[in-house]
Image (cartoon, grey):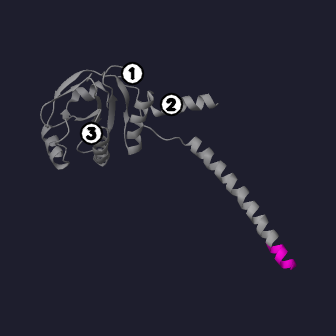
Amino acid sequence: MNVLIFAVAALFAMVIALSVGLFALARQIGVLFERVSPMGALVNDSGPEVGQQTPLFNLPSLTGGSVALGPKPGRSTLVFFLSPTCPVCKKLLPVISSVRKAEGRWLDVVLASDGQKAQHERFIESAKLSDYPYVVSTELGLAYRVARLPYAVLMDEHGVIRAKGLINTREQFDSLFNAFDMKVPSIQTYLDAQHAVQH
């Protein structure tokens, strides 16, 4: 009988110890999540700033027609800068396709690059990009100060840049649209402001 009482008491003590340990672990995980914030698109300080009017362009598309960048009543525009030799760009093409399908009612997606026209024509064929407007323009990349790829610029129907940055993952892509919806320059800006308020 004494052994049974001792076993039950030991088990009860273990349950209490485990509960305390679980509570402490949950608290530490919360602290870790607060310190390691989600990473949005990496914004550089060069080129037109978020909130400024986009430079106006009217460029021929390798897939036919022309592409006008600027105000478009009722239509926002995502310009995605890529390269046929960029592995990350190729990895993100399914994401681009998904974004275009999901947001097509209000968003136009334009692919942009520079270099040899023939190389891009082969890339369009091999990557099955003939449904996208595809412009090759050194001036466009210079206007946005695109130094690294892949890079994206999201502008609203008035031609105002609402989000931009270096994109390496689906999460960073989503951060552009989150910044657009929240009317903030970037997710980092929003998180920094929230952190400042809390402290």
Residue count near mark 3 (Cα–Cα under 10 Å), binned few <14, some 14–19, many ≥20 = many
The region drawn magenta spans: 1-7
Secondary structure, mark 2, is helix
Q: Which quadrant of the figure contains the N terminus?
A: bottom right
Q: CA distance from mark 2 to mark 1?
A: 15 Å
Bin the neighbour count of mark 2 within 10 Å (Cα to Cα): few under 14, some 14-19, many 20 and up.
some
| Magenta-drawn stretch contains 162 | no
Q: Is residue 158 above or below residue 111?
A: above
Residue flagged by tag 3: what amino acid is it?
Leu
Q: Which residue is mark 3?
A: 82
Query: Relative to 5, does residue 74 appear above or below in the rendering?
Result: above
Identified at 30% across, 45% down, the residue is 98
Task: Tell me which label, 3 or 1, sits earlier in the chain.
Answer: 1
Labels 3 and 2: the sequence-earlier one? 3
Q: Which amino acid is tagged 2?
A: Tyr
Screen quadrant of the C terminus: top right
The answer to which image quadrant residue 106 occupies is top left
Camera-side residue: 83 or 92? 92
| Disc nearest the viewer among 3 and 1 | 1
Residue labelled with disc 2: 190
Q: Which residue is depicted at the point 47% across and 34% down?
A: 187
User: Picture coordinates of residue 192 (x, y %)?
Assistant: 54, 31
Q: Position of residue 87 (x, y in %)?
A: 29, 48
Q: Which mark is residue 1?
A: none
Task: State which tag comes first along the sequence, 2 or 1.
Answer: 1
- Foreground: 117 or 29? 29
Secondary structure of the residue carrying tag 1 is: loop
Q: Is residue 21 above or below residue 177?
A: below
Which labelled disc corresponds to residue 51?
Answer: 1
Can residue 1 be seen in the rendering of this structure? yes
**Horizontally, is 167 left or right of 58 in the view?**
right
